[in-house]
Structures are given as structure tokens and as C-alpha cells.
């Protein structure tokens, strides 16, 4: 995942944060898939822009934690 040029060691806390980011990415993919299913059935999307923005904000906050380590 990281190149040899990373310049630092991954702490267990950083690994946990990166796992949380990956989980958030998985939730976003699930939200996108659910919205696609809704579209195929001619239903309104289950998730709106605000839902995606919330996940993005969470990922950004987690990324900032890693950057500050």
C-alpha cells in the first residue's frame, strides 16, 4: 500500500484509521449500488448528496489524523 519512500512507520493507530477509511469507502460503494437498484426500479434514490458528503467528511477527518501522525 505504501512505497518505501513513505518515510515513517505505520503505527497500530494509523492502521486502524486506514481500516476505518476503507470501511467508509465500502459504505459509499454500497450506497451507490443501492441507488442504482432504486433507479432500475424507477424509485427515488435511497441516498442523497448529503449522505455522500457525510461519508466524505468522515474520510477527510480520518485522513487528517493519519497526516498529523
Image: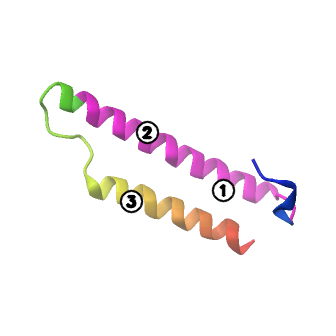
Residue 14 as seen in the image, left or right of residue 20: right
State the SS at label 1.
helix
Residue indicated by mark 2: 29
Q: Can residue 47 be found in the magenta stretch?
A: no
Q: Quadrant of residue 27?
A: top left
Relative image position of residue 68 (x, y in whole percent): 70, 74
- The magenta span reads 8-37
Mark 2: few, some, or many residues within 10 Å (few <14, many ≥20)? Answer: few
Name the residue tied to disc 1: 17
- Which one is earlier in the sequence, the residue at label 1 or at label 3? 1
SS of the residue under disc 3: helix
Identified at 55% across, 44% down, the residue is 23
Task: Compute the Cα span from label 1 to label 2.
Answer: 19 Å
Report the disc number at residue 54.
3
Of residues 34 and 4, the one drawn nearer to the viewer in this rendering: 4
**8 and 16: which is toward the camera:** 8
Amino acid at each position: 500500500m505504501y512505497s518505501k519512500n513513505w518515510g515513517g512507520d505505520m503505527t497500530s493507530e494509523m492502521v486502524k484509521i486506514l481500516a476505518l477509511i476503507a470501511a467508509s469507502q465500502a459504505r459509499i460503494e454500497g450506497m451507490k449500488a443501492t441507488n442504482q437498484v432504486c433507479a432500475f426500479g424507477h424509485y427515488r434514490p435511497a441516498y442523497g448528496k448529503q449522505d455522500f458528503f457525510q461519508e466524505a467528511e468522515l474520510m477527510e477527518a480520518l485522513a487528517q489524523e493519519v497526516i498529523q501522525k
